[in-house]
Image (cartoon, rainbow, N blue to C red):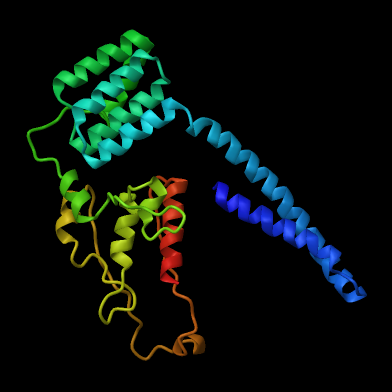
Amino acid sequence: VGGVLNRVAKRINEDYEERHKAKTVVQIREFTNKLGSLQLEHQSLKIHTGIAEEIMAHTVTPEFNKALEVQQNLVAGIDVNTQNEHIEEMINRQVPLTQVLRLLCLQSLVNGGLKQKSIEFFKKEILQTYGFEHLQTLLNLERLNMFFKQSSSRNPYASIRKTLRLIVDEVEEHNPQDIAYVYSGYAPLSVRLIQCATTKSGTSSTGNGWKGYEEVLRMLPGKTFDEVQRQEEGAIRPKRMVQGQHPRVTLVFFLGGCTYTEISAIRFLAQQDD
């Protein structure tokens, strides 16, 4: 973000400096016409710089970076026991309860639940540290299957992670080549599925849908279907469609909403498609 803001600031400054080069009436008028938009850009730059400063003040703290490290290790499947020790340490330091619950829910989702011993331990630690009024919160999370005990069935997340390449070790955040850059090496599962369904190959101009991903889709909750809409025979097509001038539009619906990060990843996919 700092690099982008710096480039924008330099460009705005260069545009302002053009006023010294304006010698003729035409040149002065051209600069005057640009002045309004330059002032708006300058104001926008100040706002975004202020936002970046507020974010940086939060993201440079040891607490934030430790929580981020635990999240990345959990989704990458790195040493669950060590991550539990970090979560226990966070409880002892009384970090906001929401941070602790997020990590426990994340661990439940990617590991197919927690061991019964771990669940009882974290319940006891949370209630003794944050108060027994949070018992209902824990029960609600269990009811929603977000904080739950491991079952004997095989956890599919490791296979999903490998098949869909959710973890990308080398990420260029300044020159991204993969959607994983939005989470510093983790590709959002939802957007990776969109990428799989819309990727063109062979003679297909619109993507192959779920073809080739049937096995991994069976590991995910919910049903999938693949339907191709075709134009009725004899229907008249608009002239611009015949000439191939119409832009391709892809509609994506999220039931229950999505995060800003997922939107950024989808925008990146759209840019790659262009």
Q: Depth check: give the residue in front, 46 or 259.
A: 46
- Name which residue lies at 43% across and 26% down: 62
Q: Is residue 57 left or right of residue 139?
A: right
- Horizontal and vertical percent position of residue 178: 36, 58
Q: How many marks?
A: 0
Residue at left offset 36%, top offset 53%: 171
Note whether 17 is above or below 56 in the view shown.
below
* Residue located at (34% from left, 26% from top): 101
- Residue 83 x/y as whole percent: 25, 28
Is residue 143 rendered to the left or right of residue 92? left
User: Residue 106 location in percent, x, y?
Assistant: 29, 34
Q: Residue at x 20, y 16 (%)?
A: 120
Is 126 on the left or on the right of 264, as rendered? left
Task: Determine whether 118 is above or below 241 in the image.
Answer: above
For this rendering, which residue is in front, 151 or 3? 3
Residue at the right extreme, as displayed = 25
